[in-house]
Structures are given as C-alpha cells and as structure tokens.
Image (tube, rainbow, N blue to C red):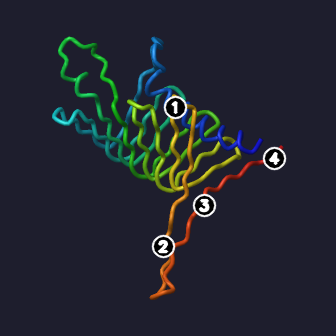
Amino acid sequence: MGKIKIFSISAILLFVMCGIFQPAAGAKEKEPPIVVEADQMSSTEESNTVLFLGNVDAKQGDLRILSDEMTVYYHEAATQDQEADTEQKIEKLVCVGNVELSSAEWLGTSDQMIYYSGNRKVMLIGDAKAWQGENMIAGEKIVYYIDEGRSEVVGGTTTVIGEGEKKEEKKQRVKMTIMQK
C-alpha cells in the first residue's frame, strides 16, 4: 500500500503536467491554448528559443506554472519548414527559480524544472517537493518518465562545514509524508 501511495503522488503530479504539453501519440484533440505572462520576453530565431523573464505565469487549462524564468526550446525542423503546419513543436521547456506547478489538488515545487518532449520526461531539480492533498514527497530531484509511467525520487548530499578531518558530507534522504484517514 505504501509503494502505491508513493508512486501516485509523483505520478499524478507529473503525468497531468506533462500530458498537457504534448498529447499522447495519435491524439488529435485540440489542446487549450497556453497563456504566458512575464515582465519581459525575448525570442531568438537562431536558437529557436523564447525566453520569459520575471514573474513568469504560464497557464493551460487548470495547469499553472510559476517561475522566475522560463525558456521554451522549439524543434528546429518545425521552425524552418516553410510548408509545415503553423504549430511549433516544443522540444524542451526549462523553468528556473522558485518553480511552482499546480493543478486541481496537487502542487509541485523546485528550484528548476526541465521537460523533454522527445522522451517525454520531466525533472524537478533542487529541493523538489510534490503534494497531493496533505500527502507530500521530497527529494533533491523528482524524475517522471511519462510513457513508462515510472517515477524516481532522488536524495542529495550536503557538505557539513567543519575543520580538517571533522569536515563531513551528510546524505539527504528522500522524505515522504502520508496522512492516514
């Protein structure tokens, strides 16, 4: 029972979030528009990127991503093909600084988030935490492989300051809180 709960918190959080950015293969349903607001935006054709800076607030349906900075990387072929559909395909999405993801009853936070559309993988990096209701899981990194339905939560290391031989590294462990009903 405990393993099912652990999987469900990170899986639900990341599956819902990632499924929005790229529908499953063969899906033809029209996705709701993605609306992004920020203090500043710059686009670079040479690198096929759009950079949003300052108080970034991205929404699609009930999904919301807040961060200090968001860079959207597009597939080069989609932007260079003159006869291609006007839709640009996201290759990678990188959010940095005070990242917060929310939808319905779940919330995820981290220092950085990377979404890779090619292998449909999401990584929450740096003090990563995910909540579903009152249940929470935390680690240095949470990785979710969408197509495999598999998630990993990884602890980190912290150097404890000391002198000479008293200097040591302490391993941070994955932490989960499950509220019993």
On the image, which quarter does residue 52 sit in?
A: top left
Which tag, 4 or 2, sits closer to the chain's start? 2
Dot 2: element: strand
Q: Tell me which label, 4 or 1, sits earlier in the chain.
A: 1
Mark 3 secondary-structure assignment: loop
Q: Which residue is mark 3?
A: 173
x, y percentage for residue 60? Answer: 47, 28
Q: Secondary structure at mark 1?
A: loop
Q: Which residue is located at x 50 percent, y 45 percent? A: 100
Which of the labelled discs sits on residue 159, or is there none?
2
In the picture of the structure, the residue carrying the numbered disc 1 is: 146
Q: CA distance from mark 3 to mark 2?
A: 14 Å
Mark 1 or mark 3: whose residue is earlier in sequence:
1
- Location of the C terminus by quadrant is top right
Which one is nearer the viewer's eye here, 89 or 162? 162
Whether label 4 touches label 2, CB < 8 Å: no
Mark 3 is surrounded, within 10 Å at the Cα level, by few (under 14), some (14 to 19) or many (20 or more) other residues, namely: some
What is the CA distance from the residue labelled 1 to the residue labelled 3? 24 Å
Q: Quadrant of residue 58?
A: top left
Q: Amino acid at mark 2?
A: Thr
Residues marked 1 and 3 touching at CB (< 8 Å): no
Mark 4 or mark 1: which is in front?
1
* Residue at the image position 64 percent from the left and 56 percent from the top: 175
Whether the residues at callouts 4 and 1 have beta carbons within 8 Å, the answer is no
